[in-house]
Amino acid sequence: MEKQVTLDVVALAELRKAVEELKERVLKIEIDLGVIESGYDAVYNALEVNVLMSAGEPSSPVARPEAKGESWDLGKIPWIDAAGGKGPYQKSEDVNNPEFKAMLKDLGAHKGKLYKNGLFYWAFPSGATVGRKRVRKGR
């Protein structure tokens, strides 16, 4: 009986690990989809401007369709203070939070780095952690 319980504990630990790996893969796929969506938006804007110019319309900024993931509420994402080689920063790993997922998607559309509301955001290579740091006024 004891041997069977030990095997079940090992199997459960392996299953948990597999589930976590699957969650990370799904998150990376969502980021890739954000990049593809961003490319679509760029092509759409270029075509729209081209149509306006060929019709003799003045070229003015064209409002692109609202891309998913571009608006995320910072107040709904938990941040933890951390320190790195370039000083203090904050990080978040709340992959089950819809706001966090939207932020990751937006980061994916911007090659993993962006500035928003005076803060610099970047995605860690794992794809499941985001860091942020206040930027100096010169930027």
Image (cartoon, helix red, strand yellow):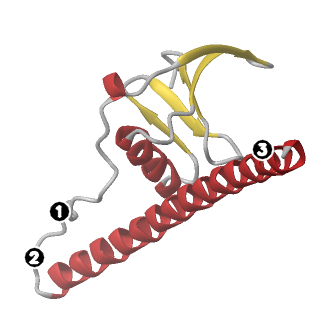
Q: Mark 3 or mark 2, which is nearer the start of the sequence?
A: 3
Residue type of the residue flagged with mark 2: Glu
**Element type at marker 3?**
helix
Residue 26 image point, x, y percent: 55, 61
Residue 24 image point, x, y percent: 62, 53
Residue type of the residue flagged with mark 1: Ser
What residue does disc 3 label? Answer: 9
Q: CA distance from mark 2 to mark 1?
A: 9 Å
The answer to whether the residue labelled 2 contacts the one labelled 1, judged by CB atoms less than 8 Å apart, is yes
Residue type of the residue flagged with mark 3: Val
Q: Residue at x 72, y 49 (%)?
A: 12
> For residue 18, what is the image quadrant?
bottom right
Residue extending farthest right: 3
**Element type at marker 1?**
loop
What residue does disc 1 label? Answer: 60
Residue 44 image point, x, y percent: 29, 76
Residues packed near mark 3 inside 10 Å, few (<14), some (14 to 19) or many (20 plus): few
Residues packed near mark 2 inside 10 Å, few (<14), some (14 to 19) or many (20 plus): few
